[in-house]
Image (cartoon, rainbow, N blue to C red):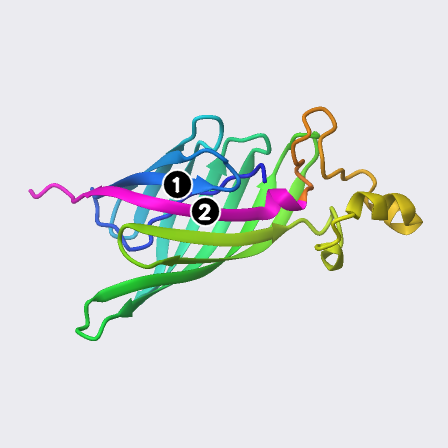
């Protein structure tokens, strides 16, 4: 899909801490670099740089933390054919090994995505769900989907002949004819496409710089 999302920190950061790595996502096709900096023990910011598109900036804040669970709010802006702004609420949980050492991390989240002006010049508002996991401190993954209810009924999500369905059904044609899923000029998914709502990412942590000791 032609919308991109940030690689957030999966564990709380300290003030002055730096983390960086690369991510590959189905949305970007090519890998992009990411960098995160801890503003405090609750806030951090992130930067992304993609070779074609996928660049962006985001901000995260921990809203709740207790034992091995914590909730994070993330606001993000991304540069791509369908420029998008995201609001995501994450719920993280870290397992503990038999010797009480920190283990794998898992999370789920709710995402709202807004595309002010997409490839075809329209606006898209999406709501979705995501799941992620980090087996160890070296790599992790995330998969999700956000749906635009104004572009097609959720019941037709797996209708792979949707373009023909819209043409042949008068009621659907009246409702969804002005939300094309493919841009005729470029052939890319528009802001209305199901592909724009799909998110699948694998990331690698390349390094971490702890905060300077005063």
Q: Residue 129 occupies which quadrant of the picture?
A: bottom right
**Relative to 133, does residue 118 appear above or below in the rendering?**
above
Do the numbered discs 1 and 2 sit on residues whose CB atoms are within 8 Å? yes
Element marked by disc 1: strand
Q: Residue 106 occupies which quadrant of the picture?
A: bottom left
Question: Residue placed at 49% from the left, 53% from the top?
Answer: 143
**Residue on which the image places disc 1:** 23
Question: Residue placed at 35% from the left, 38% from the top?
Answer: 22
Does the magenta portion include 107? no
Dot 1 crowding, Cα within 10 Å, few <14, some 14–19, many 20+: many
* Image location (x, y in percent) of residue 119: 66, 30
Q: Which of 129 and 71 is in front in this view?
A: 129
Question: How many badges with numbers are in the image?
Answer: 2
Element marked by disc 2: strand
- Among all residues in the image, which is located at the extreme top? 185
Q: What stretch is highlighted in magenta?
A: 194-214
Question: Residue placed at 76% from the left, 39% from the top?
Answer: 179
* Image location (x, y in percent) of residue 115: 61, 38
Does the magenta portion include 200? yes
Structural distance between the alpha carbons of marks 1 and 2: 7 Å
Which comes sooner in the sequence, label 1 or label 2? Answer: 1
**Residue on which the image places disc 2:** 201
């Amino acid at each position: 899909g032609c919308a991109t999302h940030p690689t957030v920190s999966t564990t709380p950061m300290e003030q002055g801490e730096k983390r960086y790595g690369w991510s590959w996502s189905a949305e970007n096709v090519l890998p992009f670099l990411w960098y995160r900096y801890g503003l405090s023990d609750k806030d951090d910011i992130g930067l992304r740089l993609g070779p074609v598109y996928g660049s962006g900036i985001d901000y995260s804040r921990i809203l709740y933390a207790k034992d091995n669970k914590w909730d994070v709010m993330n606001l993000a802006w991304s540069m791509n054919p369908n420029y998008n702004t995201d609001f995501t609420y994450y719920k993280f949980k870290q397992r503990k090994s038999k010797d009480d050492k920190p283990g794998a991390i898992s999370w789920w989240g709710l995402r709202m995505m807004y595309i002010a002006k997409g490839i075809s010049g329209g606006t898209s508002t999406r709501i979705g769900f995501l799941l992620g996991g980090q087996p160890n401190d070296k790599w992790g993954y995330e998969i999700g989907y956000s749906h635009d209810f104004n572009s097609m009924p959720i019941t037709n999500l797996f209708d792979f002949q949707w373009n023909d369905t819209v043409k042949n059904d008068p009621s659907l044609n009246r409702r969804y004819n002005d939300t094309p899923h493919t841009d005729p000029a470029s052939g890319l998914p528009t802001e209305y496409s199901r592909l724009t709502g799909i998110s699948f990412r694998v990331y690698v942590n390349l390094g971490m710089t702890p905060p300077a000791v005063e």
